[in-house]
Image (spheres, rainbow, N blue to C red):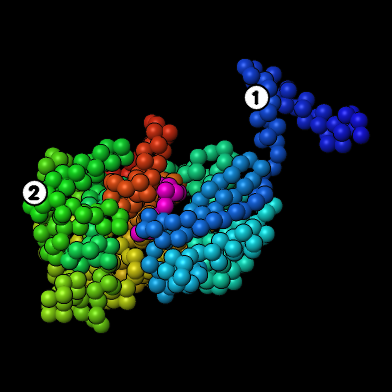
Amino acid sequence: MSVQDYLDNHMLSRKIEDAVNAAVRAKAPDPVLYISNHMRKAIPSVITKVKARQILDSRGIPTVEVDLHTNKGMFRASAPSSDISGMYEAVELRDGDKGSYLGNSVTRAVKNVNEKISEALVGMDPTLQSQIDQAMIELDRTEKKGELGVNAILAVSIAACKAGAAQKEVPLYKHIADLSGKSQLTLPVPAFTVISGGKRAGNNLAIQEIMVLPIGANRFEEALQMGSETYHHLKAVITEKYGAHGCNVGEDGGFAPNISSIKEVLDLVKEAISRTGYNEQIKLAIDVAATDFCIGTKYDLDYKSANKSGQNFKSGQDMTEMYKELCNEYPIVSIEDPFDKEDWEHTKKFSGLGICQVVGDDLIMSNPKRIKRAIEESTCNALLVKINQIGTVTEAIEVVKLAKDAHWGVVTSHRCGETEDSFIADLSVGLSTGQIKAGAPCRGERLAKYNQLLRIEEELGDNAFYAGEDWRESP
């Protein structure tokens, strides 16, 4: 075949001429580079390969990482993981072989990506997120994604979202906003974990975490500084009172002094905030995770203390009175999972008091059916969205829309088993959730999210809007 025949067969003469004309019109200083980029953009992007592997999360437990290739490049994503119950949320697929990572290996999920999912998605346009996610849902054919595994599906879904943004040549958060039909981009108020308890730490504190919210900051950058300074002042406060051993940390980086009194730890945080000088600019939030210490219809706040457990049960009404007292004494603006995941009655009654934001996590598990029920019954007034509970980017967008249409607050959340993937930072901005919960202002896998938000704010420049005082009412 002659050169001319080759050019004619592939219509290259016309394409090259178009590229040269474009370079001339643009007065490109480097015409070769301009023409190269112009030719590359002219090629429709499709998924060419999907490759998964097993990696370790922040707890040293296996999870799934995916490299999704298009003719524009390679896009990597990993699935967060947690202690999933499987009752109302999507199911992680693990091998169950006790001889490998104590049964936690994910080689079956990896195999599903490399064989089944890859075959189904190769050739698809990465900008068509809903079609990609639907293809995986149909391939799985189960309600909770138990056939392929949510860890397999989600990692691919996030990687495809990144590839879609690259194809459109827009930032990831802007692509997510486009997918959701939003125009407003909002930097969320971070809920920094400063005290860890419950199942996330080896102390005697029953509740899972205490967080600080810098709602008085003017920019996210300032909010991050407030959170970091509070965290380090808290370390000093704890050291002074309990010694250096009191500064051991939980799975998401919060300090875990070995005390059981909720008021005592709140006093520590209050003192740390006082030392920063920020005072009224910082509010508090509590994740109770009450399901972990609910026995029947009673709550055992001493369940982690061997010599006290079972001696002082509290009723749902007792817990309500305790929360009322705490909110009266401390600047608490949000309480997550104040009751058991099936205690709809007391959650509704407490939410109806209008004392603070009441966040549903274990109660609704990002499950559309439970969210709809909670909306209809006015059970809580905020959604904690965990993308691996629902399983795809498209479904996450849909549940956030459900919550916002009901005028709920929305908190984008990490998981206890995290990776260095910063996707939820872009998700929180693209969906304007107004709040993000990504752990303490320390530990690399947590800071990956907060540092990405810094970059986004910098990139947006004068168009950056920090939720601040409007943390519950982001558009």
Label at residue 85: none
Instruction: Give the mark, 2 or 1, whose residue is nearer the N terminus.
Output: 1
Q: Secondary structure at mark 2?
A: helix
Q: Give the crowd class for mark 1: few <14, some 14-19, many >=20 residues within 10 Å.
A: few
Eyeballing the image, is 312 above or below 408? below
User: Which residue: 72% across, 26% down?
Assistant: 19
User: Which residue: 87% across, 36% down?
Assistant: 9
- Residue 269 location, x and y as percent? 15, 51
- Name, please, the residue furthest toward the bottom: 296
**Near-viewer residue (223 or 244):** 244
Label at residue 33: 1
Residue 290 falls in image quadrant: bottom left
Label at residue 240: 2
| Labelled pair 2, 1 in contact (Cβ < 8 Å) | no
Eyeballing the image, is 164 above or below 40? below
Residue 407 falls in image quadrant: bottom left
Residue 430 forms part of the magenta stretch: no
- Residue 3 location, x and y as percent? 88, 29
- Residue 433 location, x and y as percent? 38, 51
- Residue 29 location, x and y as percent? 62, 17
- Magenta range: 416-425
**Near-viewer residue (149 or 363):** 149
Residue 423 forms part of the magenta stretch: yes
- Amino acid at dot 2: Glu
User: Which residue: 77% across, 30% down?
Assistant: 15
Q: Of circles 2 and 1, which is in front?
A: 2
- Name, please, the residue furthest toward the left: 241
**Near-viewer residue (319 or 379):** 319
Can see residue 367?
no
Answer left or right for 303 relative to 369: left
| Disc 2 from disc 1: Cα separation | 61 Å
